[in-house]
Amino acid sequence: MKTFIKIASVVICLSVLNSSVYAQKPKKAFQGTVTFAITYPGNTMDAATKAKLPTEQIVKINGCKSKTEETSGPVTQTSITNGVTKTAIILIDYMGTKYALKQSEKDITDALAKLPTPVINFTQETKTIATYICKKAILTTTEEDGTVSNDTIFYTEDLGCADYNFSTPYKGIPGVILEYSQFVEQINGTMMYTATLIKKGKIAETEFLIPSDFQEVTLEELKKAFGG
């Protein structure tokens, strides 16, 4: 009987240990494509101006890596980020003229240092967007002139990673933001981004590399090319 109890105890211990191991097993990183609809709430632009603005954004995600593509008139801009190496690549295609700009971690940090850092208020409120339950956060930003703005975003930790937003003012948000808005001075209005479709699927590593038909340039060369 004592032998049986010892064996049973070992079996129970192993069972509990195995259950613990499986429970702590990290979930597989998401791979897939997120489609965002871009709208302009409350905007009073004329039809001709609005026709030149983007209406959709496509984001390809593989764990901490992302590739975001958006077209506005004759320009297609693609942003490739890597939350592990903290580096980025900007691709610009202007009517067939293609440039690629690499950004190091220092480049990104220096650029963000010039922007006001928002204070993030994480809330308990949730909202379902494209079948994902998202958490609500309110970002309060104070500009140099003292102007204060409050922006509401919804994000999910089921996509991306803790450092997914490292290259943006939203770097304190752990995961992919599925709804947000931003004021754009060029149009003197607000652009609203809302995820409408999330499709799982393998994303090749080549998606996060500079295509062979793009010319790699420095920031100064890029500014000069566009008259800056």
Image (cartoon, rainbow, N blue to C red):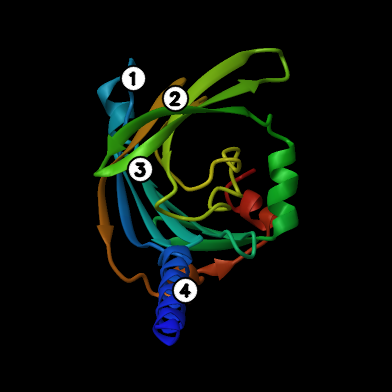
First in sequence, mark 3 or 1: give its number. Answer: 1
Report whether 221 appears left or right of 31: right
First in sequence, mark 1 or 2: give its number. Answer: 1
Gap between marks 3 and 2, in whole Å?
A: 14 Å
> Which residue is at the front of the view, 186 or 196?
196
Residue at the spot 64% in from the left edge and 59% down from the top edge:
86
Q: Amino acid at mark 4?
A: Cys
Residue at the spot 47% in from the left edge and 20% down from the top edge:
188
Looking at the rendered structure, the secondary structure element under dot 1 is loop
Q: Amino acid at mark 1?
A: Met
> Which residue is at the front of the view, 190 or 75?
190
Q: Are marks 3 and 4 in contact (CB under 8 Å)?
A: no
Gap between marks 3 and 1, in whole Å?
A: 15 Å
Q: List the single residue furthest toward the front.
A: 1
Where's residue 165, x and y in %?
55, 48
Q: Amino acid at mark 2?
A: Ile
Residue annotated with mark 4:
13
Whether residue 74 is visible to the viewer of this picture, yes or no, is: no
Numbered label attached to residue 73: 3
**Comparing marks 3 and 4, which lies closer to the viewer?**
4
Residue annotated with mark 1:
45
Q: Quadrant of residue 73?
A: top left
First in sequence, mark 1 or 4: give its number. Answer: 4
**Comparing marks 4 and 2, which lies closer to the viewer?**
4
Residue annotated with mark 2:
187
Residue at the spot 43% in from the left edge and 74% down from the top edge:
18
